[in-house]
Amino acid sequence: MRAARIDCKEKYFSLLDQVSKPGRYIGGEPNMILKDRERVNVHFALAFPEVYEIGMSHNGIRMLYHLLNRIEDVFAERVFAPWVDMGAVLQSSGLPLLSLETKTPLCDFDFVGFSLQAELTYINIPYMLDLAGIPILAVDRGENDPLICAGGPCTANPEPVADFMDFFVLGDGEDVVVEIVDLYRKAKLNGLRRWQILEELAKVHGIYVPQIHQPPKPWEVEARPGKPSTLVKRRWVEALSPDFYSTKPIIPVIDIIQDRISVEVMRGCTQGCRFCQAGYWYRPTRELNVDDIMRLTSETLKNTGNREIGLLSIAR
């Protein structure tokens, strides 16, 4: 298996001269995290259904990458939607979609987690799954397929992509993502099958499993007949913690859309405008301590060499 991965990696690099912006696919950036796959218990692919330049600008991916990789036996890698030229090269060469860090096929991961930030990126979900050789529909997946999940503000209405997903995380992911890997680690030790793991995940606050839950009404999610009645509620963290944020973010090797360091100073909004989905999805309002903002900013500037800072919040 290890030799096959090395051959796959060498073939992959030999094809990059056929595509525009090969820097999107090479990985190896400063501050990138590498772990020995043979020594981790949970292997997680953070999938962003957009090109590298957009995905690497997203603060949520940076946070999840940091939170997962600081757990010793968990390895989180990144994968972005390849541009159409790269997608065609992968298909013609017979190579699957690979992770950036170790060039591992997505089908070899335990989890593939998509970040749903905009409805226009939904079409890239089946595109990436197809390139990865993973069954597009959840009902077609078997024991050897990874668990496909999604989070982000678009999960406020998960049904448009529910057929593709094994489960969704509704709301803030900082705490629940740790609970997910803890649950999966224990499930592996106990020899649980795929459907049993999904049943356990369905019991976690903030997780919606389409194969177990169904939405009878627009405003609630109840269990299928024969299952315990459960209302799936959005998760949120009580307070923003400086531990959520890495001071050594990955430094992209090509220009990205937001090429600066980012510090989240507040989550939520004080205005409560009825038309604003973000204002409701990210409530209640939580602010990061000013001293923590100053320390995070100072340390990140030293570790990246950036000259610009983005202080992130919803307008207040």
Image: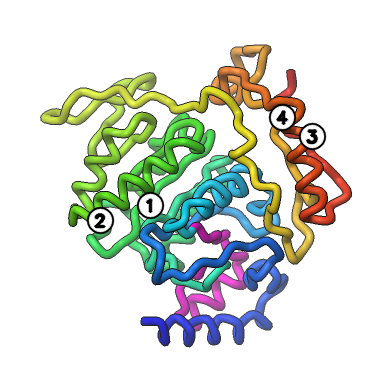
Residue that label 4 marks: 265
Query: Left or right of 40: which side holds 35?
Result: right
Q: Position of residue 19 (x, y in %)?
A: 67, 76
4 up-or-down from 167: above or below = below
Circle 2: residue type: Lys
Q: Which residue is mark 3?
A: 294
Q: Amino acid at mark 4?
A: Val
Q: Is residue 3 magenta?
A: no
Quadrant of the rendered image containing residue 223: top left
- Residue ranking furthest to the left: 226
Q: Which mark is residue 188?
A: 2
Of circles 1 and 3, the one toward us is: 3
| Front residue (pair 261, 21) | 261
- Which secondary structure lies at badge 1? strand
Give the numbered dot on residue 148. 1
Mark sitting earlier along the chain (3/2): 2
The amino acid on which the numbered mark 3 sits, given as a three-letter code, is Met
Residue 316 on image: x %, y %:
74, 18
